[in-house]
Image (cartoon, rainbow, N blue to C red):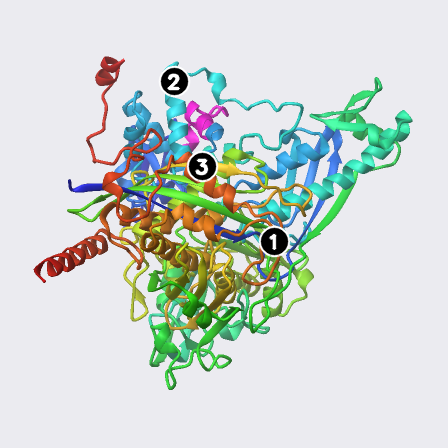
């Protein structure tokens, strides 16, 4: 198809350029005009960070072919603060603390701008509904609603403009004060450059070939056809790794690209650097891999049986890590108990879903330093590992952490930085890789799914006499953070309670599933879910209020933990008291008494959602006043 | 009534910084021209707000304004090692080490000014961009103080290292000292369950968390609100599905995340039980904020409709299934 002669007005300026017919409006704005304020988060119109105005209408620019915007008036996030001064809404986001990682914020600001243009008097519930097409993974949305309400009230003259300015510290003490986030202006204006927004002169684009099989031997990789393609500057596979291959947070069991066999669907096998991403993509399709499929294992319980496939030679039982904790004698404790409960709990794998998919650049600097720029949560460890993998002295390897568009543990793994380094070394040119959302989801770590068996023995007065827990967790194909997750899960499993007899076992297992890794709350979420759920059952059975059963067992100042550590000050009682008081909790055993409670539906509870029913018109609003 | 309400609660504990290993971080500080401050450390922002927290700590320690703090960071070739961004360690490890580096830089400046003014060094004060000697008329701007130092051949710099007194776990019984700072928390959730569709809405969460010392209370609230909503996602809707190693949830059309319409009103209560070991008393909040949310919601579902969800997530299908099972058991009992 011939190029398109594209004309439009973008942020007040006439633009006349040729564009590729396959380009989306988002690509044209970001790649051709370098307007990188609006981001790509999903490429499917689900997340909203690419939202721009087309002829004044909020549009997801990842869903719009550029040809559809022919002749239109287009405004991006850069249009809102064109004079250098933030808009009222941007200032309100700054003041309210509405940005965290900032990656969703350009789209969120556009959607919020549209919301108060559509109804300058919109109430909080209507604002929520109008922002329903934009996902934020960091903030929990509350401060975003606060910001939109604040901007609305300033615009309507209900609040002075000074409501948006910085507070003054008293006596120069800035600790304990709500100082505005110093990085917020760069985030609400779209000025901050994440790795996927960065370019370098003479830069190549990288694409990755990934495994379609969960477990297979790689018989051969033939890259010759890919290398011959015009515009391809370098193709790499595990044969190109000069040093000792293998990375991981606790055990270096994962090669930069599959070596000899693949262990999960989506594992990297080879990578191409080419003049543009499309050429790199075509080259990836020309790489021929011959596989010999191997039996695979998908259930962690099955993985521990004899005679099943073994994923890694160093772990013939497929156990990545087993953490035991032992205090007292649980069998004796259960025998002494008045009530013994037993239940199994299960938690699923979940995705970090940071709005910024993985991206990075690499180059070799004039002094021969291999440099990787990426949103890595652990540049220190990555530098160590990469130096060994590419056989360079540590001083010749440099990691720069670019602004992180959400991490939550998911960017602790060196899952793609090795490929970037190898391609920069091979091509002697800067290279950049930007994951698609699908690539991010299939190839990077998840939260460990778990199956937990829990037994709890209690005395009639609520005291826990014994607790026994066994958690089996699917670590997937590689170790990543499994060892650490099992450790934290075990240490915290029995909760902040004094229990004389404790037996905990957490076991992380290899399977051919997507690897599990670090995820905010790191194993404690799984084990404490089980313990805290069972305490509610115990309270019901013993006729105790759920706060009371926790107070009966609570660790106090000077308590000893289940790992036999003596604590100093313990704030648990204060936390219980504070939550009970703030929620005006009505005392009683948790026996499904919801229907009879008198503490429900207070002022600090939001109304339930009924879609579309809450839109207020200006007339209605004015009439109400 | 098709829609039923209930409440549940859960508590939590959590360890701050790296687990069962020695954690460490380094930082450099300089009180710079014009009374600004230059801070260099190896790892900072992933969205939690640590840059702002550091600017506040630096302003507090040096007596400059947060807006005059410049932070150089996150480059293995240009900044000292500070390990990683995770483990709820940023305010604790980076905050404390930056405070210590600032104290060294400030001591250099104070030493020069004590000499110039001929007063005891303990009488030198700095705050909000000014430097003065207590009980005297000596008072200049921090910019002038830096200038004075430099004319005497002194650059007011400092550096620090902050490490934890922690150990690994015994391989047989787990005994050890995995952390030196612990936090505790408690959350109450109020839900509404639609008994026809099985849908659960979380209408409010009251969240009380110990953070040691809240450097920026709004930032703490942001971590609590965000953590609760991530936990709500895992509790009610998110599910990475695999079949024979292939996922059927590779995009946001199938992998469902909480939106603005799903989130509860979060009422945060910040508790400050200062850490006695670090110089600032701070602890952390990133991860603990998520821990009690799911059991609080599941306990609230039981309070509302009498079914215990033990396998996550509590999707409408799963809640309806549990309600039908409960009805079946009730009618069986009635028939007996």
Q: Nearer the viewer, mark 3 or mark 2?
A: 3
Q: Quadrant of residue B177?
A: bottom right
Res. A344 visible in picture: yes
Q: In the rendered structure, are the residues bearing label 2 and label 1 in contact, judged by CB atoms less than 8 Å apart?
A: no
**Secondary structure state at the residue bearing disc 1:** loop
Determine whether, in the image, residue A48 is placed left or right of residue B59.
Answer: left
Q: Which mark is residue B333?
A: none
Pointer 1 chain: A
Q: Is residue A490 above or below residue B63?
A: below
Determine whether, in the image, residue A178 is placed left or right of residue A75.
Answer: right
Q: Which residue carries the number 2 mark?
A: A155
Residues in magenta? A76-93
> The C terminus of chain A is located in which quarter?
top left
Closer to the camera in the image, B184 or A316: B184
- Asked if badges 2 and 1 are on one and the same chain, I answer yes
Q: In the rendered structure, are the residues bearing label 1 and label 3 in contact, judged by CB atoms less than 8 Å apart?
A: no
Q: Residues within 10 Å of mark 3 (few under 14, many from 20)?
A: many
Residue positioned 44% across, 45% down in the render? B186
Q: Which residue carries the number 1 mark?
A: A567
In magenta segment, residue A539:
no
User: Between marks 2 and 1, how big is the CA–CA gap?
Assistant: 52 Å
Q: Residues within 10 Å of mark 2 (few under 14, many from 20)?
A: some
Pointer 3 chain: B
Q: Is residue B233 above or below residue A234?
A: above
Q: Which residue carries the number 3 mark?
A: B268
- Asked if badges 3 and 2 are on one and the same chain, I answer no
């Amino acid at each position: 198809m011939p190029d398109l002669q594209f004309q439009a007005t973008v942020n007040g300026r006439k633009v006349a350029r040729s564009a590729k017919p396959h380009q989306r409006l988002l690509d044209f704005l970001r790649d051709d005009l370098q307007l990188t304020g609006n981001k790509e988060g999903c490429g499917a119109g689900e997340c909203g960070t690419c939202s721009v105005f087309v002829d004044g209408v909020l549009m997801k620019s990842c869903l719009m072919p550029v040809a559809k915007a022919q002749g239109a008036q287009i405004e991006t996030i850069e249009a809102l603060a064109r004079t250098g001064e933030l808009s009222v809404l941007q200032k309100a986001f700054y003041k309210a603390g509405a940005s965290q990682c900032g990656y969703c914020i350009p789209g969120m600001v556009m959607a919020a701008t549209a919301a108060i243009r559509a109804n300058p008097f919109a109430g909080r519930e209507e604002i929520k509904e109008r922002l329903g097409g934009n996902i934020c993974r960091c903030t929990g949305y509350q401060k975003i609603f606060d910001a939109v309400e604040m901007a609305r009230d300033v615009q309507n003259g209900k609040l002075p403009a000074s409501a948006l300015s910085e507070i003054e510290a008293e006596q120069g003490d800035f600790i304990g004060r709500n100082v505005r986030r110093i990085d917020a202006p760069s985030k609400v204006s779209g000025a901050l450059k994440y790795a996927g927004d960065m370019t370098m002169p003479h830069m190549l684009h990288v694409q990755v070939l990934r495994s379609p099989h969960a477990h297979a031997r790689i018989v051969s990789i033939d890259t010759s056809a890919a290398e011959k393609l015009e515009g391809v500057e370098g193709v790499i596979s595990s044969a190109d790794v000069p040093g000792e291959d293998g990375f991981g947070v606790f055990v270096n069991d994962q090669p930069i690209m599959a070596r000899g066999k693949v262990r999960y669907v989506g594992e990297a096998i080879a990578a191409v650097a080419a003049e543009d991403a499309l050429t790199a993509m075509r080259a990836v399709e020309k790489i021929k891999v011959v596989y010999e499929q191997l039996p695979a294992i998908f259930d962690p319980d099955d993985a521990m049986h004899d005679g099943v496939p073994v994923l890694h030679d160093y772990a013939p039982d497929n156990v990545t890590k087993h953490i035991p904790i032992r205090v007292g004698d649980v069998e004796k404790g259960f025998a002494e108990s008045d009530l013994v409960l037993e239940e199994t709990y299960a938690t699923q794998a979940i995705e970090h879903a940071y709005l910024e998919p993985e991206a990075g650049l690499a180059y070799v600097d004039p002094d021969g330093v291999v440099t990787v720029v990426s949103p890595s949560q652990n540049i220190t460890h990555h530098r160590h590992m990469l130096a060994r993998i590419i056989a360079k002295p540590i001083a010749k390897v440099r990691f720069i952490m670019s602004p992180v568009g959400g991490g939550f543990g998911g960017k602790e793994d060196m899952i793609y930085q090795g490929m970037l380094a190898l391609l920069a070394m091979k091509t002697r040119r800067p290279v950049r890789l930007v994951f698609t959302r699908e690539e991010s989801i299939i190839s990077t770590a998840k939260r460990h799914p778990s199956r937990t068996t829990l037994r709890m023995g209690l005395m009639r007065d609520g005291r826990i006499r014994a607790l026994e827990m066994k958690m089996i967790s699917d670590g997937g194909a590689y170790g990543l953070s499994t060892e650490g997750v099992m450790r934290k899960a075990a240490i915290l499993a029995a909760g902040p309670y004094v229990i004389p007899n404790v037996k905990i076992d957490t076991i992380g297992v290899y399977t051919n599933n997507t690897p599990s890794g670090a995820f905010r709350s790191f194993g404690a979420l799984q084990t404490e879910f089980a313990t805290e759920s069972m305490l509610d059952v115990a309270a019901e059975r013993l006729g105790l209020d759920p706060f009371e059963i926790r107070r009966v067992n609570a660790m106090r100042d000077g308590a000893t933990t289940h790992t036999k550590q003596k604590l100093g000050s313990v704030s648990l009682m204060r936390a219980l008291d504070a939550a009970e008081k703030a929620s005006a909790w009505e005392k009683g055993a948790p026996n499904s008494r919801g229907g009879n409670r008198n503490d429900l539906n207070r002022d600090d509870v939001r109304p339930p959602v009924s879609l579309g029913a809450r839109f207020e018109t200006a007339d209605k609003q004015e009439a109400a006043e | 009534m098709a829609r039923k309400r209930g409440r549940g609660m859960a508590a939590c504990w959590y360890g701050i910084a790296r687990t069962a290993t020695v954690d460490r971080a380094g930082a450099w500080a300089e009180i710079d021209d014009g009374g600004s401050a230059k801070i260099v450390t190896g790892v900072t922002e992933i969205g939690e707000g640590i840059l702002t927290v550091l600017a506040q700590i630096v302003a507090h320690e040096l007596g400059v304004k947060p807006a005059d703090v410049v932070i150089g960071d996150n480059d293995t070739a240009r900044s000292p090692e500070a390990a990683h961004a995770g483990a709820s360690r940023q305010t604790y490890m980076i905050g404390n080490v930056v405070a210590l580096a600032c104290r060294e830089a400030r001591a250099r400046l104070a030493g020069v000014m004590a000499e110039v003014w001929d007063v005891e060094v303990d009488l030198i004060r700095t705050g909000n961009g000014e430097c003065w000697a207590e009980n005297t008329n000596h008072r200049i701007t921090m910019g002038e103080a830096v200038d004075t130092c430099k004319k005497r051949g002194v650059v007011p710099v400092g550096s620090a290292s902050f490490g934890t007194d922690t150990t690994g776990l015994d391989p047989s019984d787990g005994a050890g000292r995995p952390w030196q700072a612990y936090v505790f928390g408690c959350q109450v959730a109020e839900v509404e369950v639609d008994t026809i569709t099985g849908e659960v809405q979380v209408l409010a969460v009251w969240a009380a968390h110990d953070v040691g010392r809240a450097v920026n209370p709004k930032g703490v609230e942001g971590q609590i609100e965000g953590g609760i909503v991530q936990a709500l996602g895992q509790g009610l809707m998110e599910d990475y599905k695999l079949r024979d190693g292939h996922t059927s949830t590779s995009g946001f059309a199938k992998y469902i995340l909480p939106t603005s319409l799903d989130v509860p009103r979060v009422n945060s209560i910040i508790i400050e039980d200062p850490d006695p070991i670090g110089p600032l008393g701070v602890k952390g909040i990133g991860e603990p904020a998520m821990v009690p949310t799911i059991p609080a919601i599941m306990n609230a579902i039981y309070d509302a409709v009498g079914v215990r969800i033990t396998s996550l997530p509590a999707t409408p299908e799963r809640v309806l299934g549990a309600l039908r099972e409960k009805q079946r058991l009730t009618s069986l009992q009635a028939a007996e």
